[in-house]
Amino acid sequence: MNVLIIGSGGREYSIGLALKKDKIVEKLYFAPGNGASDGLGENINISDFSKLADFVEENEIDLTIVGPEGPLVDGIVDLFQDRGLSIFGPTASAAQLEGSKIFMKNFLARHGVPTAKYVETDSLDSAYKFINELSTPIVVKADGLCGGKGVIIAESHDDAKRAAGEMLSGNSFGDAGTKIVVEEFLDGYELSVFAICDGKDFVVLPAAQDHKRLLNDDEGPNTGGMGAYAPTPLVNDEIYRKLEERVIKPTLKGMKDEGNPFTGVLFIGVMVVDGEPIILEYNVRFGDPECEELMPLLKSPASELFHKAAMGDLASANIKFHNKYAVGVVMASKDYPYKSSEPAEIIIDDIVHDDIEANSHISFAGVSRGDDGKLFATGGRVLVCVGIGDSITQAHERAYMLCGQVHFIGKQCRTDIAYQALELES
Ligand code: AMP
Ligand code: GLY
């Protein structure tokens, strides 16, 4: 099988690594990929959807996997399907679950899926009215895609009103904020749960926990995610059962009934409040860095999971996971998440420790390759050091041993990834 992966991050690299292990996969392509993915497959520099479809036909590519939400919301799946090409991901109308928070919230309300109390509005008056009814903190969200920055958690009523006003006037997020959602704050612990869906059936992956703040102890600004681990002991069978019955099944049925059958990754942002899973948001793609920990836990061939989902045939798949844990620590460049940083050469020590060699690896993201073959950190989240183990403690140790072997000027990483789980394990 020949596979094309769309995207350039650590998420796409980790999907590539999983497919490389898979004997069925012959040729692997990335569009556009990054400075390290050319070590796994071939990078191609095409972004236009119809030219990508031409490339797929010319190179006999059997499956395309889409990493980020942008091309999904912009309709890459629709175009590929019209041309009879097999692609893993939702259509543009199904991708509205991520592309529009208002679509998502109204969908959840229509289908009785538990979510925070909210109003959606384009009027400052009704935003103010609802803000006055809520106790603080208060959550204000721009409707459209804002690269993960469109959510404000306001500590006072005045701050919430200011955030709503700035969004509605177009000052904060342009058109993405001219409609907003105001909602109650949920106080609990957050999980990332992923269901691979084929329109009707689904496979739930081990639940993960991300660390969105830049600094230890969940301080500092929000980022795309500074590290994650899976499976998390914060989830028990009862929570998985509630998620399947109250969230995933009604969502797949609702999407199908409304003429938008959902194929691809349903990323469920969950807040567990007093043992009850409440939905914060949906995304229509893998989380990054969660994907980097989930892919190595997959025991079944990755191609089977993605291909069967794309073909609407998950019912015939028997997807298995290793009985292990994975911890991933993001290394980011010096000025992340504020601005881009000067390229910095990445030096990776020879790994002489057999245990680390066998049980850890790097998923590369913001890197480029110089003419001399050297790798450079070129900004944002640069790479993820992933450790695998029989416990979270062991996986954590291995991930951080690997971190100690990777050097570039200005590197920053959190040193407390998986702290909630480690407290439970100790
Ligand atoms: P979202 O893009 O909707 O996932 O929001 C980004 C982050 O804001 C989430 O991962 C949560 O940490 C936080 N958040 C969003 N909505 C709420 C809420 N209603 N209550 C508490 N935290 C929230
Ligand atoms: N790690 C969270 C996200 O990908 O949105």
Image (tube, rainbow, N blue to C red):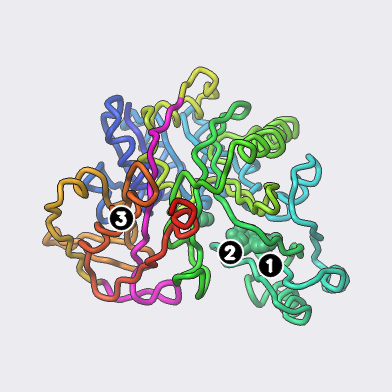
Residue 141 part of the magenta segment: no
Q: Given the image, on which type of amino acid does mark 1 rest?
A: Gly
Quadrant assignment for ligand 1 = bottom right
**Which residue is denoted by mark 1 in the rendering?**
177
The first of marks 3 and 1 along the sequence is 1
> Residue 412: percent from the left, percent from the top?
34, 71
Task: Please indicate whether residue 288 sits to the left or right of residue 101 in the image.
Answer: left
In the image shown, does 220 or 70 lie closer to the viewer?
220
Give yes or no for contact between labels 2 and 1 (Cβ–Cβ under 8 Å).
yes
Q: Given the image, on which type of amino acid does mark 3 rest?
A: Glu
Q: From this viewpoint, which residue is outermost toward the front?
A: 426
Element marked by disc 1: helix
> Residue 146: percent from the left, percent from the top?
58, 64
- Any part of residue 8 in sight: no
- State the extent of the magenta-drawn residues as a range: 319-343
**Which residue is denoted by mark 2 in the rendering?**
146
Cα distance between the residues tagged 3 and 2: 35 Å
Q: Quadrant of residue 26?
A: top left
The first of marks 2 and 1 along the sequence is 2
Residue drawn at x 69%, y 55% is: 101
> Residue 301: percent from the left, percent from the top?
36, 28
